Amino acid sequence: IGTNTSTGTFAAVEDSNTGSGTMTSTTIGTNSGTVSAGSISTMSVSTNSGAISAAGQGTTSHVTINKNKGTFVAKEDSTSGSGIMSDTLVGTNSGMVSAGSIATMSVNTNSGKIRASGQGTTSNVSIGTNTSTGTFAAVEDSNAGSGTMTSTTIGTNSGTVSAGSISTMSVSTNSGAISAAGQGTVSNVHIGTNKGTFVAVKDNNPGSGTITNTTIGTNLGTVSANTISTMSVSSIGAFGTITATGTVSNLSVSVFSGVLIAGTIDSLIAKNAPGNPQMLKVVEGGVTRQLELAPATPGGSLPQSVSYVYDHNPNSNDAQLTLAVNDGANTGSYDVELLSSSAAPGSGFDLAALTNVGAAPAHIRNVLIEGNLAPYTGDYSQIGIPSNVNGVYLPGTALAGVGIMGNAPSGSVTAASIEAVSFASITEDCPAPHDPTRTVTVAATDATPWDAAQLLAPGTAIVQANNTFLAAAGQTGQGLSQPVALFLDTGPNDDDGDAKGHFDPRVVLLGNEGNVIGASNPVLAQTTVTIPNDDDKHGDHDDDDDPSLIQTIHLTGAGGSIQTAQPIAASITSSDALGDLILQAPQGIEANITAPSIFGNIMANGGISGTIQTTTGNLGRVLTSNGHVLGVTTIQASDGISGEIISAGDLVSQVHGNGGFSGVLAAGGNLGYLDPSSLKRVGGLAVNGGFSGDVVVLGNIYGDIFINGGLSGRIAAQGAPNNLGAGRQGILGNININGGMSNTSAIVSAGEIGDAGLGTDLDVNGSVKGILAAIGSISYEIHGSTKFASIFNNVGNPNSPQYDGGANEAAIDAIFSGLTIGDLTALLLHLNKLHVSNGNLSDS
């Protein structure tokens, strides 16, 4: 038939006669009408936009359709063997191809529907391109064995491929959706590049949601199942994910830039994978673990290849990594970091073994383990390392440091040399009397330099610190801080330049107080230590006679804390809320301290000459018990304060300074805290030795200010509305000054100074020669001469004799003039320009 038009029909009718309804050896140019038979075999159609169907016997075989825009159906009914379509060739399908069972079909391009339902099986189907509108389905229903798709080849899939069960499939590129649901099993599938979704859905059917024996070249999309076993992936791209709600076992990955999410990971292996910054990222049981290789300098080189096994320690069941590096021609140093999102014991990332398999020594700088160093040799054969290698085994490498968030056994670090170690605890032989059959575990808070040295295997030299070191602090099972002890060899070397080879007893205790603010992640500390330029104490112009000095400590994570007698020269910074800082060096706090917020105490065994500041939140916090206010945190210096203490929000802490205050205290919010229910006031400032600095508060001063030694500096508060009512803002706490006020001093409020309702006032013992000025009322007692005082009381009241058309009020407002705490330099300039001219306040 050349053309079968839309009104044309061609039929071989099947009835009760044996052999009826058979259509064989048919050629049609264009079909827009209806072609029907009980059985169709050996048919060629150039273009079909009509309907071609086999019903009754319901079988088709050896049918070729160049372009199918209509329907081509082998209908399955109650007749045994019906609905079978075999040996079919379709050039382009934009219509519907449907049967109970499809076997041996080739389609160049499918943008329509190809569907097997009823029997619901397909086998030996090849599709060159399945476009975004194309569907290919083996439908699973109540028929036994339905929904089975086997031996399928697809070049490019941008559409939908679905079945109850998929086995033996090859896809060059998938940017669409491939899914098995119902039986929900996938086996023996190869996908060259996956940019779309590849899913085995788990439901109530036993065994559903399983992917087995699968190979993927590059995964840039999503692979999802309940259980994944025996899968090989060459590369998981940055946005690629593999998810198993249950278990992953025998997964092999070379390049791992994406994410693996699983309930449990039994075994994950990478062999000779190219060195990349992110070698591994898994989310197991809700905990994220990563293997990071970080160049010591930005853009620096990494090892040529890396091999590892990720599984679980058979004794503790903790996630663990066995790792081998091969630097090849790489000469740049890098850090090996095993990172965990959880600070809790048992959810970290343990290191079983780390070694170098290259001919040249590895250029590893630091090894950071956010878990335990748990030597284990059980996985050595899977990545081809010697059977005796466990722990950190880098005998040819000069390490900067090894940082362990958890526990490590003695002798578990082997290196050519090392400058620093850190750990939460170390398990070692009983030292006194020595008994190798018994061990003792020493916590970081009790560890000595001798204990720290026990971590090292014989032959590992301890050398002077001159590097950047990594350490991480976790939490106990009760969510409290689990400090780690960072030990450094600070030197100096002896007069002959020989290393002394011991750790400094002035340990750096790094803590994790995240529980205070509800944070449960590890806190990472990056500590930079240098050997300063030679001070020529020994006249040899050689740096060997100078001790190492901590320059900076940068904390990443919420709740970091530091306690040390080591001096810190330049800075302490934190990416998140900062906890306690107990700095016991006699130099006090010379470093600048910066964090988004600070909720801990700050204690200096000496003065404070650096800047302590928050960038977005409060400095300090209110301490409560059962809803009752007990007090606030403390900032304390045993000597003078010449630096700056700046809070972007409220400055809640109680600040104590012995030796005078010549620096700056500033808050974008309030100074101190007022409990709105009890009106209890906490926080403030107490100074011994005189106050010659500046206090600028853009909110209210609730806390008391005590100054012993006189005031020659300036104190100012802008005030802010609160629950006390209109006009009750500004300086609402007591100011007690013993020693008088000099002619350079000033106390200024854009609200009150003292509050009758709170029972607070200004009390000065000594003569007053400076400025007292408030837009509201001033409650004061002066026990001394006021002959040279300039007192401007209630200048915002038109009935005040010092109102003068609002001139004095304007001068006070001009100090603040819409400025924020970010304009501190301008605020201080305005405050210190304030003076009295012709009987009025002026800042001109």
Image: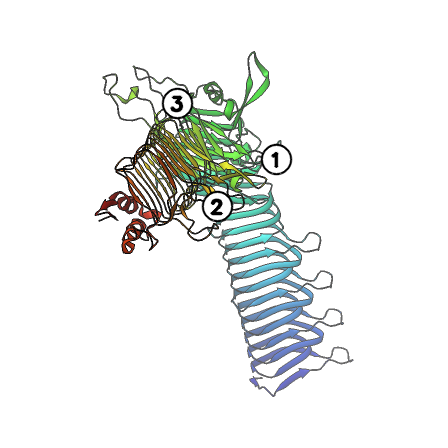
Residue highlighted by disc 3:
489
Q: Amino acid at mark 3?
A: Asp
785, 273: nearer the viewer: 785
**Apparent side of residue 502 relative to residue 266 in the rendered image (left or right):** left
Q: Residues within 10 Å of mark 1 (few under 14, many from 20)?
A: few
Q: Quadrant of the N terminus?
A: bottom right
Q: Amino acid at mark 1?
A: Asn
Which residue is rendered at x = 55% and y = 29% of the image? 374
Mark pair 2, 3: CA separation: 37 Å
The residue most toward the right is: 16
Q: Quadrant of residue 178?
A: bottom right
What secondary structure is marked by label 1? Answer: loop
Q: Residue 456, how many percent across, how many down?
A: 47, 22
Residue highlighted by disc 1:
317
Foreground label between 3 and 1: 3
Q: Quadrant of residue 832?
A: top left
266, 822: nearer the viewer: 822
- The colour scheme of the drawn protein is rainbow
Mark pair 1, 2: CA separation: 24 Å
416, 192: nearer the viewer: 416
What secondary structure is marked by label 2? Answer: strand
**Apparent side of residue 184 relative to residue 733 in the rendered image (left or right):** right
Q: Earlier in the sequence, mark 1 or mark 2?
A: 2
Q: Earlier in the sequence, mark 2 or mark 3?
A: 2
Q: Residue 841, how many percent across, how many down?
A: 26, 48
Residue highlighted by disc 2:
256
Q: Is residue 221 visible?
A: yes
Q: Amino acid at mark 2?
A: Phe
The residue most toward the top is: 433
Q: Residue 628, how many percent across, how many down?
A: 56, 40
Which residue is rendered at x = 68% and y = 72% of the image? 59
